Amino acid sequence: MLLAIDIGNTSIKLGIFDEDKLKATWSLATGIHRTSDEYGVVLLNLMERQKFLPSKLTGIALCGVVPPLAPTIVEMCRKHLNIQPLVVEAGVKTGIRIRVDNPREVGSDRVVGAVAAHYLYGKPVIIIDLGTATTFDVVSPDGDYLGGAIAPGIGIAVEALFTRTAMLPRIELICPKQVIGRNTVSAMQSGIIFGYIGLIEGMVQRIEKELGEKSKVVATGGYAHVVAQEIPIIEIVNPDLVLTGLRLIYEMNREGNA
């Protein structure tokens, strides 16, 4: 069994694979002040509750965008699972080419997601990750990561309205019935939800114009469920895209395959 770990700014997503089957996923709040022991206790408890034996793990793969936390998670893997994890970083085989000015600037989670999208969907792919940030990543049919775009995430936008204004409340992120809000809450929901729908549709249109061809459009990330169903151009919602990419990269780098 393989443990895949995606360290995000807001949450850490974990998944257990048995061969190519994803058997379980969990999400932990990201906390840079937590110790490896704290993370270890939580993970072992989650595994025990779903009857996964740590002794059955044969490997761990991880990626992340929170540099101070990576050593803590690596230590947890060594100390509590007795496994040295594969950390996706420069020098790790991914199977795709990074065609940007400085490949080291690209977040490892974006690379891992691109690996999974290319493997699963083949043709030109636009990956929209609706997480703490809203990112757009573009992969060519030949497996070239071409770059993308980064915008503030939906959650950041909501918090900014609440914290930077005197009279606007914190709101629930649900799609309103109409664009023209009849009260403050529905007006804020309209601005956020339909505003991001317009952002996504406009960005995809511009990306495809630059590519010169239609692309498969895939959404992932914690906020994908909030807007994806309202956007016809999004063909697939895959919340486990990065976990799948970690499995694929782990297989590429196993002894005998590297």
Image: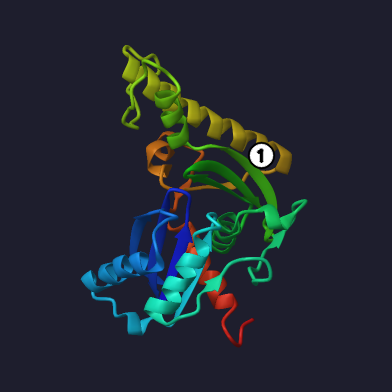
Above or below, 224 against 160 in this view is: below
Q: Which residue is drawn at 51% across and 63% down?
A: 70
Give amino acid for label 1. Ile
Mark 1, residue position: 207
Q: Is mark 1 on a helix, strand or loop?
A: helix
Image quadrant in which the C terminus is located: bottom right
Furthest residue in direction top, as rendered: 182
Above or below, 51 against 210 in this view is: below
Above or below, 208 against 86 in this view is: above
Horizontally, is 148 left or right of 10 in the view? right
Horizontally, is 110 left or right of 244 in the view? right
Instruction: Return the residue nearer the eye: 253 or 158.
Output: 158
Q: Pinpoint residue 82: horizontal percent, then vertical percent.
A: 42, 82
Give the quadrant of residue 94: bottom right
Instruction: Return the residue nearer the eye: 127 or 101.
Output: 101
Q: Pinpoint residue 71: horizontal percent, then vertical percent.
A: 51, 66
Give the quadrant of residue 53: bottom left
Whether residue 1 is visible, yes or no, is: no
Q: Residue at x 74, y 52 (%)?
A: 100
Above or below, 158 against 70 in this view is: above
Q: Pinpoint residue 13: horizontal percent, then vertical percent.
A: 41, 58
- Judge the density around disc 1: few (<14), some (14-19), many (≥20) Cα neighbours within 10 Å: some
Furthest residue in direction bottom, as rendered: 256
Give the quadrant of residue 1: bottom left
Q: Residue at x 45, y 65 (%)?
A: 5
Task: Describe the colour scheme in one phrase.
Answer: rainbow
Q: Residue at x 33, y 60 (%)?
A: 26
Whether residue 86 is visible, yes or no, is: yes
Instruction: Return the residue nearer the eye: 233 or 37.
Output: 37
Horizontally, is 158 left or right of 43 in the view? right
Q: Pinpoint residue 226: horizontal percent, then vertical percent.
A: 38, 38
